[in-house]
Image (spheres, rainbow, N blue to C red):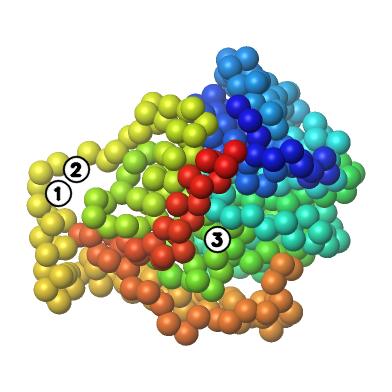
Amino acid sequence: MAVCGTEMSSQHAFYYVVDERLEPVAFALACHLVRTWRLDVHIFVEGGATSAKRRAAVPGVYYHENELSCLLPDGVPSSEKWPRIVYLRIFAPRFLKQYERVIYLDADLLPIRRDDRIWSLPLPHGLAATHDFEVTHDSPLPEMSRTEWLASIGVHAPQYLNSGVLVIDVAAWLELDFAALLQDYVAAHANGMRMFDQDFLNAVFQERWSGLSPSWNFQACLFSVGIDDAFPPIFLHFSKPDKPWMGRFREGVDDLDNWGYQYLSKAARRAGVDMNGLLSPKKINVLSRLKYDFRRHISGLGYRPSKERKLRGEVALRRENLIAYLADVKARGGFADRREYEIPSSFREAVFDGKTLRLPAGGQFNDLLMMVELVEDMA
């Protein structure tokens, strides 16, 4: 399998940390990254049988098998949603010392476009990330205010990063003894931890990480808000239960769930990866289907059922909070990668499908979907 072009940077790289189940997804995305960014991509596979033999022939994609789990201290808390593997992204840079800067990516992010300015962006504290927009004004725990929740995990700064995209200065990162820091943190805050490695990183780097614009980690909570024109996604993050490899989307609504599935399918096909084993479309019984279709029908007639009114109220509040957040960041000098930007004054409206709101993907996304084929054909 050939790599697009011959110029490959030896200073920068991407990396994934996945289990055996998501290794095919990471491999498909890695192949696309190698072609579009012309950089090495490292895939750390933990807890499964070796996959290196069947993947080793791909230039620019490098495998690491079960190298990280032994570095994780005993007794760290985890959950079904946040298993122990989430901590391992923290330790991977010690195996990437040959690079000046690396970017960690969750496997549920789709690489949409390339922006090389990230490699020269100043990182005074060795880390850049995007704010977690799910908790811009809210707490993930209904029994606690946002301030109380942050205090319970040892975070006094108002900003809370999302660990799905981490831009790391390798030398600065390796100066920290993360195993010892993690042990100390768990001893003090284990009872409050809910997002585990993310809580830990926010405590360690509070007020010492460079904040990137939403473009770098365009999270699922932003899908229905309609700010993709103001902040065109570089990495589109399906940070929600429905992942792009599951095939969970509403036929006839060209939203990001539908678009993301088509995008990943094309990338997987080009990489020779079979994603069928990961498909898990939701099964909807007849009564539920009739209920959803009825709601959608009366919504189309101009009457909004209570479910739709509730969802649109939540989107309106999310927009209000987002606008306030963007205004606050702008007043403080802007994002590390983008000092000037216009706060949207109007938004595209989402379509109610009878169950949820789905924002039709903008024209730029359809253009990008075509670019996947164009870029891969040039490889």
Residue 5 location, quadrant: top right
Above or below — where is 276 with respect to 168? above
Q: Residue at x 55, y 28 (%)?
A: 23
How far is mark 1 from mark 3, CA to CA? 34 Å
Q: Which residue carries the number 1 mark? A: 288
Image position, residue 62 (x, y; %): 70, 28
Q: What kind of residue is marked 1? A: Ser
Q: Quadrant of the C terminus?
A: top right
The reply to whether callout 2 and callout 1 are in contact (CB within 8 Å) is yes
Q: Residue at x 57, y 32 (%)?
A: 27
The reply to whether callout 3 and callout 2 are in contact (CB within 8 Å) is no
Q: Which residue carries the number 2 mark? A: 284
Q: Which dot, 3 or 2, sits closer to the camera? A: 3
Q: What kind of residue is marked 2? A: Ile
How far is mark 2 from mark 1, CA to CA? 6 Å
Q: Nearer the viewer, residue 299 or 197?
A: 299
